Image: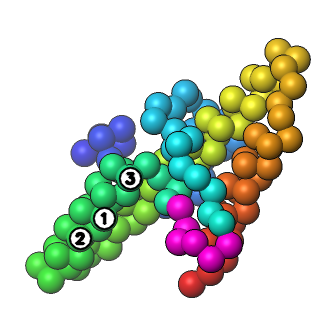
């Protein structure tokens, strides 16, 4: 299988250089309609609902394949995690690019927009550090 046909692994994602950082391209369907998490409410998803459902379906397939092909299942799990991480990076990069675009045009970005952006980063960071 040619390298470009091979799914990205977590090792590939970790070795992507600064100039080739995932998520530098324009991204469609950014989850901008999701409301930030309020204290005591269930956490908002970091990805759009359709993508979450697709990732869960793929994860179920990975787990089901473990019995017959354990090594392949681990490789598929790694590729799935890499794809999810890449997608999250794309979403955050698109949001940052939008803010930077406003700044470069001299537009005044409201404190509320910045607060919501920071809240998304905080939510994501908190999830990374929890079990």
- Circle 1: element type: helix
Which one is nearer the viewer's eye here, 52 or 59?
52
Q: Residue furthest top?
A: 105
Image vertical order of residue 12 relative to residue 29, above or below: below
Q: Quadrant of the N terminus?
A: top left
Residue at 30% over, 64% down? 56
Label 3: few (<14), some (14–19) or many (≥20) C-alpha neighbours in 10 Å: few
Q: Earlier in the sequence, mark 2 or mark 3?
A: 3
Give the Cα distance between marks 2 and 3: 17 Å
Asked if labels 3 and 1 touch by Cβ distance under 8 angstroms, the answer is no
Which one is nearer the viewer's eye here, 4 or 113?
113
Checking the image for residue 49, the label placed there is: 3
Q: Which residues are magenta?
A: 39-44
The x, y position of residue 107, in whole percent, is 84, 20
Label 1: few (<14), some (14–19) or many (≥20) C-alpha neighbours in 10 Å: few
- Circle 2: element type: helix
Q: Which residue is mark 1?
A: 56
The x, y position of residue 106, in whole percent, is 88, 17
Residue at 78% over, 23% down? 102
The x, y position of residue 13, in whole percent, is 54, 53
Checking the image for residue 60, the label placed there is: 2
**Residue 70 visible, this angle:** yes
- Circle 3: element type: helix
The x, y position of residue 17, in whole percent, is 66, 44
Magenta span: helix, strand or loop, mainly?
loop
Q: Is residue 114 magenta?
A: no
Label 2: few (<14), some (14–19) or many (≥20) C-alpha neighbours in 10 Å: few
Q: Residue furthest left?
A: 68
Where residue 69 sits, quadrant-wise, is bottom left
Q: Answer left or right for 64 relative to 122.
A: left
Residue at 53% over, 56% down? 46
């Amino acid at each position: 299988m040619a390298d470009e046909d091979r799914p990205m692994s977590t090792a590939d994602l970790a070795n992507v250089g600064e100039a080739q950082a995932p998520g530098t391209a324009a991204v469609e369907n950014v989850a901008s309609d999701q409301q930030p998490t309020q204290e005591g409410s269930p956490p908002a998803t970091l990805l759009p609902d359709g993508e979450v459902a697709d990732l869960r379906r793929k994860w179920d397939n990975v787990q089901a394949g473990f019995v017959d092909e354990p090594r392949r299942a681990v490789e598929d799990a790694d590729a799935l995690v890499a794809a999810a991480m890449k997608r999250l990076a794309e979403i955050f990069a698109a949001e940052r690019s939008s803010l930077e675009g406003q700044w470069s045009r001299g537009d005044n970005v409201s404190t509320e927009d910045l607060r919501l952006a920071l809240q998304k980063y905080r939510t994501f960071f908190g999830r990374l550090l929890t079990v």
